[in-house]
Image (cartoon, grey):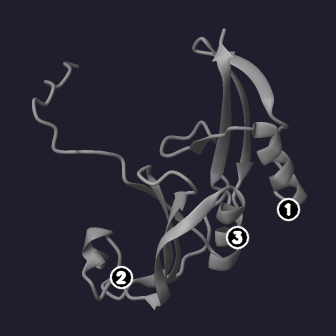
Amino acid sequence: MTEPAAIASPDVASFFHVNVNCTDFERSLAFYRLIGFEPVNTFEGDASFGAVGLGPVLRLPDDCAGRAVLLKLRGDGHGPRLDLIEWTAPREAPPPPRSLAQPGVGRICLRALDADAVHARLAAAGHHGYTPPVRIVLGGSVIKVFCVEDPDGAIIEFMEFLGRA
């Protein structure tokens, strides 16, 4: 397979948002607030995404609707956003748990300034990580890392950079 030619003038400027679907909007919003996200734009009530023409764009029915909020990490005014949505139409059952080795989006990684403090805060709120923060050397960097699932099973990784190996 040959490599595609580099684009001289890129048409894609930056990473904007990651969408996380949830089954209980308030519960998931509380989780993401706990780890440092704050609302940027809230779509009040049961927003009719189909009415504005998003149905075909998202390959959803014309009457798709849901509760949604666009979140940013506190203090990160220009970074990527998290688009949290509870779909009310169509409403689908959650999929079975995934393995991190399956193809597709596996996890979202957030840079932590103090992995131990984040882990303790999450554990105190009932969100238990797969492990406590573990110190490892990866790609020449010394990091402290752990993973936890959001209320619907999306895997969030926290990585604190401690220096070079």
Is residue 107 depicted above or below 42 in this figure?
above
Give the residue pinned by disc 1.
125
How far across and down, in percent of the image, does residue 28 sit? 66, 69
Q: Which residue is at a point 60% across and 74% down the rendered structure image? A: 93
Q: Amino acid at mark 2?
A: Phe
Specify the quadrant that holds the N terminus: top left
- Nearer to me, 5 or 132: 132
Give the residue pinned by disc 3.
30
Check disc 3: other Cα within 10 Å, few if <14, some if 14-19, many if 20+: few
Q: Which residue is at a point 48% across and 45% down the rendered structure image? A: 104
How far across and down, in percent of the image, does residue 88 sit? 52, 85
Q: Which residue is at a point 26% across and 74% down the rendered structure image? A: 56
Q: Amino acid at mark 1?
A: Ala
How far across and down, in percent of the image, does residue 6 sit? 15, 25
**One can see residue 122 in this view:** yes
Q: Nearer the viewer, mark 1 or mark 2?
A: 1
Residues at marks 1 and 3, CA–CA distance in whole angstroms = 10 Å
* Residue 49: mark: 2
Q: Is mark 3 in CB contact (under 8 Å) with mark 2?
A: no
**One can see residue 98 in this view:** no
Residue farthest to the left? Answer: 8
